Image (spheres, rainbow, N blue to C red):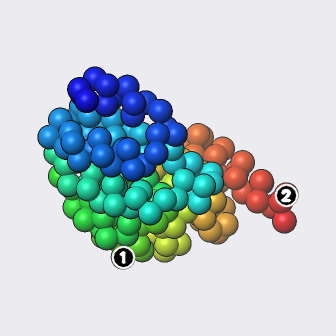
Amino acid sequence: MQSEEAIRQLEDRHLPLEKVEEIFLTFRDNMQVVGQVAMNLSLRTSVYAPEKSAHPLMGKLLTALAEVEDMGSRWAVAKNPHTPVEVLTKLADDEVNLVRALVAANPNTPPAVLQRLFNDEKIVRDGLSGNPATPAKLLNTLSDDTDRMVRIRLCENPATPEKTLAKLCDDPDPSVAKAAQVNLQKRRSAS
């Protein structure tokens, strides 16, 4: 099989994972094919119903993809809800800030790793601010972040404590204040 044929086959998100693994093992040195393997895994993974895309080979492939030089592949692994915790922990130290940001945004990242990522750069804090698994103490501290996008994502996070949202309703940035008011109102009308 040629790499072009492998890429064409990988465009099918229903391709059996056994075939995806076979292609990965055959073309593991071809970053274009490897990137398409990562894309295939992303396309078949639903963040709304992750259990539907669970498969024993998924974790094995994600673990292997975390080791490749292709940043896009590591990026896809970092955001995948099936990525094993030990892989997320390792990717939290990736040299590429976008990979670390996606680890920070992944709800399966352990709290200790999220705590470690708290002192990282803005793009990583942005990931933390939207992650519903980020501990409440960190979410509260992020409400004082100097970056308005971090504070806006914090307002949209369903795990942000009401007390923190109430504080953000008085934010000097009108976009942040509005986002906090909308989320707070939704919560209060839902209860």
Contact? badges 2 and 1 (CB < 8 Å):
no
Vertical placement of residue 185 versus 118, above or below: above
For the N terminus, the quadrant is top left
Residue 33, picture quadrant: top left
In percent of width and height, residue 176 lies at 57, 46
In this rendering, position of residue 82 left or right of residue 190 = left
Which of 115/19 is in front? 19
In this rendering, position of residue 18 left or right of residue 68 = right
In whole angstroms, how far apart are the C-alphas of marks 2 and 1? 33 Å
Identify residue type, mark 2: Ser
- Picture residue at 52% right of the left edge, 40% below the top: 14
In this rendering, position of residue 134 left or right of residue 49 = left
Q: Label 1 belongs to which residue?
A: 112
Residue 170, picture quadrant: bottom right
Element under label 2? helix
Element under label 1? helix
Q: Label 2 belongs to which residue?
A: 189
> Is residue 54 something that shows in the picture?
yes
Q: Identify the disc placed on residue 14.
A: none
Which of 38/174 is in front? 38
Vertical placement of residue 43 versus 46, above or below: above
Which of labels 2 and 1 is toward the front?
A: 1
In percent of width and height, residue 69 lies at 16, 45
- Picture residue at 29% right of the left edge, 41% below the top: 23
In this rendering, position of residue 99 left or right of residue 70 = right
In percent of width and height, residue 79 lies at 41, 51
Identify residue type, mark 1: Ala
- Picture residue at 59% right of the left edge, 40% below the top: 175
- Picture residue at 51% right of the left edge, 54% below the top: 130
> Is residue 122 something that shows in the picture?
no
Which of 83/190 is in front? 83
